[in-house]
Image (cartoon, rainbow, N blue to C red):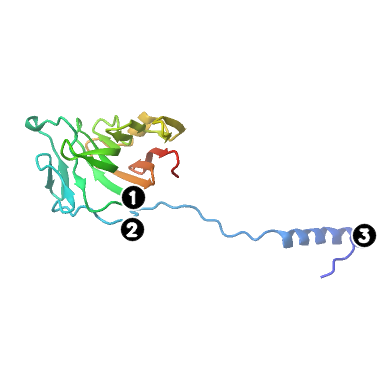
Amino acid sequence: MKLPLLGSCSASAVVGLAAALIVSCAPVRAAQSYPEPAGADSAGFVPIFDGKTLTGWDADPKYWRIEDGMLVGFVTPETLLKANTFAIWRGGAPADFELKVEYRISAAGNSGINYRSVEIPTPAFALKGYQCDIDGASRYTGNNYEERSRTFLAVRGQITRATPEAKRAIIGSLGDKDALATLVKKDDWNLVHLIIRGNVCTHLVNGQVMVRSGEIGDT
């Protein structure tokens, strides 16, 4: 289409032409969309505990039992621990993965979920590696603690990066650690969600990101 010379048009024609050009040149935008709550978000997850047996697991029966469909860790005055003892899943060695676990812990309890770990010879059922801390007082819950190695990789509320020299640098914040602790329910059920990509570890408790930690050289 040939456009008329602006000098030969009336003022009203010029205004109309300008409006037509603006409309015809406007980019066509795709409809915008936004993330939505995942809800139950069970797609792709497979159970690793059948609620009835320790099939696929290895644990000291002095400290672990199955009760009402749950895996229960317990300590009595007669069986006080001198070192941590783990219920070890032997059903595979996942690379990148996500894990969801519901837990309830006593007020004085201290526990954790180890992953990316190796079993050491002694004591029995001992592991060395990353751990999502769990405790009844919510002092440590959500932390990334490296069992039998560098200790705290990220404390609740921190985004950290570790170097080969074992230094851990805080590079961001997820919130105040005490404020985040209030989101952990005491003497009740809580949901831990671990998202592990290489050595980039994200710990969520009840839908809240508590820590994110990484290692130099990983993404």
The furthest residue to the right = 8
Mark 3 or 2 closer to N-term? 3
The mark found on residue 7 in the picture is: 3
Q: Secondary structure at mark 2?
A: loop
Residue 79 in the image: state x and y as whole percent: 9, 33
Identity, as a three-letter code, of the amino acid under mark 2: Gly
Q: In which quadrant will I find the C terminus?
A: top left
Q: Nearer the viewer, mark 3 or mark 2?
A: 2
Q: Secondary structure at mark 1?
A: strand
Say if mark 2 contacts mark 1, CB within 8 Å: yes
Residue 45 in the image: state x and y as whole percent: 31, 56
Residue at 67 percent across and 59 percent down: it is: 27
Identity, as a three-letter code, of the amino acid under mark 3: Gly
Q: In which quadrant will I find the N terminus?
A: bottom right
Residue 41 in the image: state x and y as whole percent: 35, 54
Q: Nearer the viewer, residue 209 or 61?
A: 61
| Residue 190 visible in the shown view | no
Q: Secondary structure at mark 3?
A: helix
Q: Between marks 3 and 2, how big is the CA–CA gap?
A: 67 Å
* For residue 190, side relative to residue 175 (left or right): left
Q: Nearer the viewer, residue 38 or 122?
A: 122
Q: Between marks 1 and 3, how big is the CA–CA gap?
A: 68 Å
Q: Between marks 2 and 1, how big is the CA–CA gap?
A: 10 Å
Residue at 83 percent across and 58 percent down: it is: 15
Mark 1 or 3 closer to N-term? 3
Count residues near mark 3 (Cα–Cα under 10 Å), then give few for <14, some for 14-19, many for 20+: few
Say if mark 1 contacts mark 3, CB within 8 Å: no
Q: What residue did someone put label 1 on?
A: 98
Q: What residue did someone put label 2 on?
A: 44
The image quadrant that residue 166 belongs to is: top left
